[in-house]
């Protein structure tokens, strides 16, 4: 399965920083930012706490089996990279 990677950065007004990737397939490309926002909310970060939020297409690649299974079930996969909130 070919997936698209969206590199996402969130900086909070209190100095916290969250970096993660959103993986989506062709059918869900238009929902990448929505999935990013859902993940941010799940971390307990409210929109008024966000100073900077960036979700940009980075590249495409072939997904490993775990990522493929999650995308088939949920439409996306989140890869957490940094969280200093």
Image: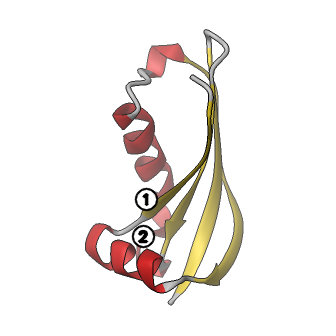
Q: Residue furthest bottom?
A: 1
Q: Residues within 10 Å of mark 1 (few under 14, many from 20)?
A: some
The image quarter containing residue 82 is top right
Find disc 2 in the rendering and name its residue: 28
Q: What residue lies at 42% left-to-right and 49% top-to-bottom?
A: 34
Contact, mark 1 vs mark 2 (Cβ under 8 Å): yes
Please state, as top left, top right, bottom left or bottom right, where the C terminus lies in the image: top right
Q: Which mark is residue 65?
A: none
User: What residue is rendered at 27% in x and 74% in y?
Assistant: 73
Q: Residues within 10 Å of mark 2 (few under 14, many from 20)?
A: some
- Counting from the top left corner in percent of width and height, residue 52 is at 66, 26
40 to 44, vertically: above or below: below
* Residue bearing the label numbered 1: 31
Q: Position of residue 22 (x, y in %)?
A: 53, 58
Callout 2 secondary element: helix
At 66% from the left edge and 82% from the top edge, which residue is drawn? Answer: 61
Q: Nearer the viewer, residue 83 or 46?
A: 83
Q: Nearer the viewer, residue 60 or 70?
A: 70
Vertical comparison of 9 with 31: above or below: above
Task: Please determine whether, in this image, residue 72 is positioned above or below residue 84.
Answer: below
Q: Position of residue 8 (x, y in %)?
A: 63, 46
Q: Quadrant of residue 44?
A: top left
Q: Splitting the image into 4 quarters, where does residue 47 fall?
A: top left
The residue most toward the right is: 58
């Amino acid at each position: 399965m070919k997936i698209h990677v969206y590199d996402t950065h969130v900086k909070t007004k209190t100095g916290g920083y969250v970096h993660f990737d959103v993986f989506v397939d062709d059918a869900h490309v238009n929902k990448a930012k929505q999935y990013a926002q859902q993940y941010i909310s799940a971390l307990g970060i409210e929109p008024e706490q966000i100073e900077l939020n960036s979700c940009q297409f980075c590249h495409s690649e072939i997904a490993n089996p775990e990522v493929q299974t999650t995308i088939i079930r949920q439409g996306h996969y989140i890869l957490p990279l940094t969280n200093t909130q």
